[in-house]
């Protein structure tokens, strides 16, 4: 069976550890024949990522602190040095202050609100702008969201609002970049046992509720999100843009 991403180059952001969804996506892309470019926040994170991705076909690692316009601009030039088109961008970046996740949303302060929006939503716009010029053969941009964008989920708070903005940005990007044959979509993953999820108070209760109530009676596996990202980046997903694909064991039905 041919590999679905053979000959393609993908930029993947957001790997923090082996439990990251971004890591599962990188493994799925590698399995399907893609060459991978990884972005990282700082030198400490670079060392951690290198330690767990040595078995993957990583062709380059590039620093990219998405709160820095200079580093985002430098991303374009660093990718250009590869001498080949970029076919996919995977955006797995989100951040909010822990206190803004744990207290009532009405108590969110301006600084925390803007921080969550900048890292979790605007970064998709900024990275898309940086990578799109290198998608000379068209391409696919995929981000990660969660159903807390449209439903109130206890303790998700400011991140839910940021995810709502992210989803809207995804749609506008799909409209803007469509004429360049660049597709933009989001995957709405269910509650997962990731390191970042532990910052959400009550995540263990959410996981148990998913096991008891979801149509599939189980929680989502990171590999399932990885396979969906492969679909979107491959020719199989060539007609899909501006969409949210739910990979949540069916919890969006409830």
Image (cartoon, rainbow, N blue to C red):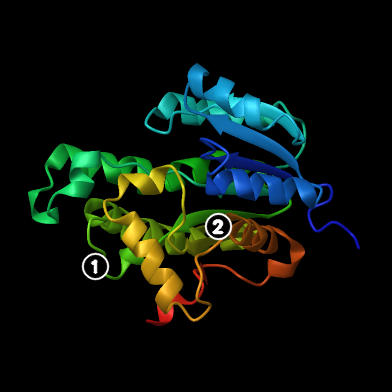
Task: Return the x and y of residue 130 as percentages of the image width and height.
Answer: 53, 38
Q: Is residue 141 above or below residue 95?
A: below
Quadrant placement of the C terminus:
bottom left
In the displayed structure, does residue 2 sit left or right of residue 133? right
Picture disc at residue 152: 1
User: Which residue, given by chain and number where applicable, does mark 2 sit on?
Assistant: 177
Of the two numbered discs 2 and 1 in the rendering, the one whose residue sits closer to the viewer:
1
Residue furthest out toward the top: 43
Task: Tell which residue pokes out farthest to the right in this image.
Answer: 1
Q: Extreme left residue here?
A: 107
- The secondary structure type at the circle numbered 2 is helix
- Tell me which residue sits at (69%, 64%) in the image: 231
Q: Which mark is residue 123?
A: none
Identify the image quadrant of residue 62. top right
State the image coordinates of residue 184 (x, y, percent, origin top left): 55, 60
Instruction: Name the residue located 30 percent from the left edge and 50 percent from the top edge.
Output: 200
Q: Earlier in the sequence, mark 2 or mark 1?
A: 1
Q: Position of residue 103 (x, y in %)?
A: 14, 49
- For residue 18, side relative to residue 231 (left or right): left
The answer to which quarter of the image holds residue 203 is bottom left
Q: How many marks?
A: 2
Residue 191 can be seen in this image:
yes
Q: Between residues 181 and 109, which one lies in front from this camera angle?
A: 109
Q: Neighbour class for label 2 at 10 Å: few (<14), some, many (≥20)? A: many
Q: Residue at x 32, y 44 (%)?
A: 199
Above or below for 20 versus 206: above
Query: Which quarter shows the N terminus?
Result: bottom right
134 displayed left or right of 185: right
How crowded pointer 1 is (Cα within 10 Å; few <14, some 14-19, many 20+) is rated as few
Q: Is residue 115 above or below residue 3?
A: above
Distance in Å between CA atoms under marks 2 and 1: 31 Å
Q: Are marks 2 and 1 in contact (CB under 8 Å)?
A: no
């Amino acid at each position: 069976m041919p590999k679905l991403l053979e000959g393609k180059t993908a930029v993947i952001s957001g790997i923090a550890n082996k439990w990251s969804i971004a890591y599962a996506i990188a493994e799925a892309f590698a399995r399907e024949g893609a060459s991978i470019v990884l972005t990282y926040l700082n030198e400490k994170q670079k060392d951690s990522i290198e330690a767990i991705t040595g078995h993957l076909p990583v062709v380059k690692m590039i620093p990219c602190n998405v709160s820095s316009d200079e580093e985002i601009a430098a991303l374009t030039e660093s990718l250009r040095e590869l001498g080949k088109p970029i076919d996919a961008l995977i955006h797995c970046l989100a951040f909010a202050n822990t206190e803004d996740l744990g207290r009532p949303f009405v108590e969110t302060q301006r600084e925390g609100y803007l921080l969550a929006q900048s890292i979790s939503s605007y970064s998709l716009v900024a990275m898309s702008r940086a990578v799109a010029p290198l998608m000379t053969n068209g391409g696919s941009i995929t981000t990660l969201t969660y159903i807390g964008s449209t439903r109130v989920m206890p303790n998700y708070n400011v991140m839910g609002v940021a995810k709502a903005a992210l989803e809207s940005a995804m749609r506008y990007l799909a409209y803007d970049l469509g004429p360049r044959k660049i597709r933009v979509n989001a995957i709405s993953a269910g509650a997962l046992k990731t390191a970042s999820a532990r910052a959400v108070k009550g995540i263990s209760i959410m996981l148990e509720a998913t096991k008891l109530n979801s149509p599939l009676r189980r929680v989502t596996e990171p590999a399932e999100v990885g396979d969906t990202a492969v679909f979107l980046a491959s020719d199989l997903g060539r007609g899909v843009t501006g969409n949210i694909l739910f990979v949540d064991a069916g919890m969006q039905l409830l």
